[in-house]
Image (spheres, rainbow, N blue to C red):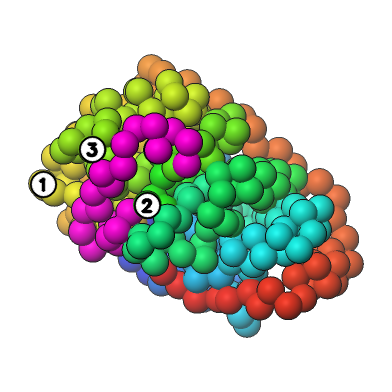
Amino acid sequence: MRAFITGLSGPTLTAAERQFVRDEDPWGLILFKRNVTTPDALRRLIAEFRDLVGRQAAVLIDQEGGRVQRLGPPHWPSYSSGAGYGALFDRDPASGLAAARLGGQLIANDLSQLGIDVDCAPVADVPAAGADPVIGDRAYGNEPAKVAVLARAFAEGLMAGGVLPVLKHLPGHGRATADSHQRLPVVTADRATLDTTDFAAFRPLCDLPLGMTAHVVFTAVDPVAPATTSANIVKDVIRDSIGFNGLLMSDDISMGALSGTLSERTEAAIAAGCDVVLHCNGAISEMLEVAAAAPVLQGDAARRADAALAVRKRPEPLDVTASREQFAKLMQGTEPRAGSA
């Protein structure tokens, strides 16, 4: 088993992808809208991937709600953005927390029916004034304590539904003034400010089983390398200051924020302390390059991977119809938005 998560090009595996999955044995699979047609077709794709690797490998998707949800109508419902839960929390904290947990559990129900067992959520980023809107309404709010409690509720809902959460984007993307899909954001805030805002939202969530890094430079910690490829940030901030001990995956290493070849990016992320690297776009030539550079998953990385997957459990009983009605009542007036990012 190798220390990377792969994407695929479409709704069915090509012959080249079948050979790739057999030969390179990725730790997991991540799904996007290009992989989705019908529920039955998606179930078949997931089952074939797992059959090829010969284990119940992790299957991931970004299903936050709002702008970032890969599953949507007509087969699946739309869900609120993080800001929707935040708006309800401001009116009634108990209702906001209940809605976030229930939203997470309903999303988990959708995912578990398909065989998807990891959701790349919640977002614990804390937006700052003047930041790029790439996070925007994906965030639960602008105060670390509020973000942390709502992210916790959403994560608990996912886990109740048998799906593992991925805490993102460690140690914080909310202050970034660029979209890391396009170019490298550089944050120049001092360490004291970061500790009490950006990093603070993640500390109460440090026990979650999986986390994802941010392609963001924090000059107060490392003047050059973004978190994904910075040993200083991974050790000093993510592992020590925040206290996150779960499986740490990179954000997508094909994003425009990173420099160098894909081999160099993969090697740099692993050397910095990422346990696995994430490659999303489904381009087979890139997949082969990443796989060749990704090490065998072993040592502490393998231990953290095993510990994360051991948290998977059977979904708790859920009256889906009644829960959807309750969720709609709670969220009335918050206007959930659907789409992609």
Residue tagged 3: 219
Tell me the quarter of the picture where residue 152 sits.
top right
Residue occupying image coordinates x 36% and y 60% = 131
Label 2 or label 1, whichever lies nearer to me, is 2
Residue tagged 1: 260
Give 10 or 320, whichever is nearer the viewer: 320
How far apart marks 3 and 2 lie (CA) works out to: 13 Å
Up-down relation of residue 1 to residue 103 (above or below) = above
Q: Residues within 10 Å of mark 1 (few under 14, many from 20)?
A: few
Give 137 or 3, whichever is nearer the viewer: 137
- Which three-letter amino acid code belongs to the residue tagged 1? Gly
Up-down relation of residue 3 to residue 12 (above or below) = above
Residue tagged 2: 175
Label 3 or label 1, whichever lies nearer to me, is 3
| Viewer can see residue 57 | no
Residue occupying image coordinates x 34% and y 29% = 234
**Quadrant location of the C terminus in the rendered image:** bottom left
Which residue extends farthest bottom? 74
How far apart marks 2 and 1 lie (CA) works out to: 25 Å
Give 47 or 308, whichever is nearer the viewer: 308
Name the element at disc 3. loop
Name the element at disc 1. loop
**Quadrant location of the N terminus in the rendered image:** top left
Percent across and percent down for residue 34 are 41, 71
- Which three-letter amino acid code belongs to the residue tagged 3? Thr
Q: How many marks?
A: 3
Q: Is residue 271 magenta?
A: no
- The residues colored magenta run 176-197
Tell me the quarter of the picture where residue 91 sits.
bottom right
